[in-house]
Amino acid sequence: MMKRENSNKTRIIGLRLTPEEYAKIEKKCKASTCRKLSDYIRKHLFDKPITTTYRNQSLDDFMEETIVLRKELNAIGNNLNQAVKKLHTLQQIPEFRDWIIRYELEKKIFKNKIDEIEKHIFKITNKWLQS
């Protein structure tokens, strides 16, 4: 059984805030590296350093698009792997031809996604270099 950290914290302070005050504190907490609102408030009250995060919107956009592309590439890769596995088990020529045609189509889609990634990276790189 894990020992609870901060188990000596037995005193509770009740504090009432307006919705606006709470929203303001919550926003500041979310901009910090604190995982809990109570940790953020405790650090603030006792003048301990609070590490805030800096968010770069262009980097966030880049990461979001990259994640979508990665998921698409994984799906294409899975389809290609299934096609190759099926090719190894086929014994009839007509089915083999169908899988070859499907493989060529998946390969073109895969190549297009790779080209899209390269264009996206080039665009982001140029944007960062202009800053």
Image (cartoon, helix red, strand yellow):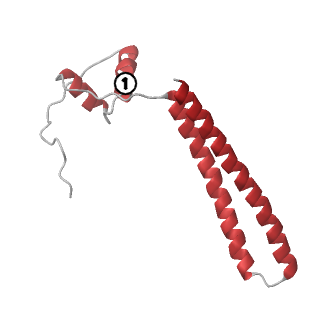
Q: Name the residue located 29 percent from the left edge and 18 percent from the top edge.
A: 16
Q: Name the residue located 62 percent from the left edge and 47 percent from the top edge.
A: 69
- Residue 38, image quadrant: top left
Count of numbered marks: 1
- Residue 14, image quadrant: top left
**x, y (%) of residue 78?**
65, 63
The one nearer the camera, 76 or 130, is 130
Amino acid type, residue under disc 1 in the picture:
Glu
Residue assigned mark 1: 26
Q: Is residue 70 above or below residue 51?
A: below
Under circle 1, the secondary element is: helix
25 to the left or right of 75 = left
130 to the left or right of 26 = right
**x, y (%) of residue 52?**
33, 27
**x, y (%) of residue 50?**
26, 27
Crowdedness near tag 1: few (<14), some (14–19) or many (≥20) residues, C-alpha within 10 Å: some
User: Which residue of the protein is positioned furthest toward the bottom in this rendering?
Assistant: 91
Q: Is residue 95 above or below residue 6?
A: below
**x, y (%) of residue 86?**
72, 75
Q: Is residue 13 above or below residue 108?
A: above
- Residue 33, image quadrant: top left
The one nearer the camera, 90 or 115, is 115
Q: Quadrant of the N terminus?
A: bottom left
Q: Name the residue located 68 percent from the left edge and 69 percent from the top edge.
A: 82
8 to the left or right of 50 = left
User: Which residue of the protein is positioned furthest toward the left in this rendering?
Assistant: 8
The one nearer the camera, 83 or 37, is 83
